[in-house]
Image (cartoon, rainbow, N blue to C red):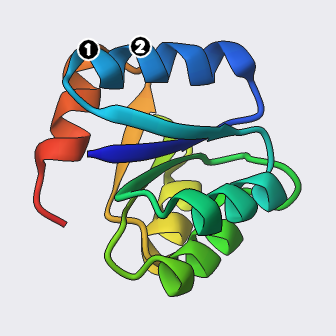
């Protein structure tokens, strides 16, 4: 699967990229904010986008709504902490297919991209 990673922390992007690549996926882009994510999404047309729940400037839900319109077939995944239930609900309502909960383990990444949308 061709994946775009959107997280403002470079270390998290790198860790997710390593886990996804080890699981056989291709990282087609990395973004540090919502606008950069949209620009890259248009350019690379990923099959999946992983979005940090607190991605600047407005968090995941508004971006996921825009990505849902831009990439209607893409699998959209939000990253959140276990206690961020409202954030996850908002992302799911906006079009996310699922969530990766912190701490993110390689097995969670594998499951997030193998599950059917």
* Residue at x-position 35% and y-position 46%: 2
Image quarter where the C terminus lies is bottom left
Percent of width and height locating residue 85:
49, 52
Residue 114 position by quadrant: top left
Given the current orientation, which residue lies at the most extreme bottom position? Answer: 69
Percent of width and height locating residue 64:
57, 69
47 on left or right of 111: right
Percent of width and height locating residue 61:
63, 68
Q: Where 107 sits versus 31, above or below?
A: above
Q: Where 22 sits versus 48, above or below?
A: above
91 on left or right of 46: right
**SS class of the residue under badge 2?**
helix
Q: Which residue is mark 2?
A: 18
* Residue at x-position 56% and y-position 73%: 67
**SS class of the residue under badge 1?**
helix
Q: Camera-side residue: 78 or 5?
A: 5
* Residue 117 disc label: none
Marks 2 & 1, CB-CB < 8 Å contact: yes
Asked whether the viewer can see residue 103, the reply is: no
Crowding around mark 1 (Cα neighbors within 10 Å: few <14, some 14 to 19, many 20+) is few
**Cα gap from disc 2 to disc 1, whole angstroms:** 6 Å
Q: Camera-side residue: 32 or 29?
A: 29
Image quarter where the N terminus lies is top left
Given the current orientation, which residue lies at the most extreme right position? Answer: 57
Q: Which residue is mark 1?
A: 22
* Residue at x-position 12% and y-position 51%: 115
Q: Camera-side residue: 20 or 116?
A: 20
Crowding around mark 2 (Cα neighbors within 10 Å: few <14, some 14 to 19, many 20+) is some
Q: How many marks?
A: 2
Q: Where 73 sits versus 91, above or below?
A: below
63 on left or right of 58: left
* Residue at x-position 69% and y-position 73%: 62
């Amino acid at each position: 699967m061709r994946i775009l990673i959107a997280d403002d922390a470079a270390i998290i992007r790198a860790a997710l990229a390593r886990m996804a690549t080890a699981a056989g996926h291709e990282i087609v882009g990395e973004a540090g904010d919502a606008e950069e994510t949209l620009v890259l999404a248009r350019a690379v047309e990923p099959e999946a986008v992983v979005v940090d729940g607190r991605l600047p400037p407005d968090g995941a839900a508004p971006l996921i709504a825009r990505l849902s319109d831009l990439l209607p077939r893409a699998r959209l995944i939000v990253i959140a902490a276990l206690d961020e239930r409202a954030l996850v609900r908002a992302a799911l309502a906006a079009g996310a297919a699922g969530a990766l909960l912190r701490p993110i383990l390689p097995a969670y990444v594998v499951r997030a991209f193998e599950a059917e949308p």
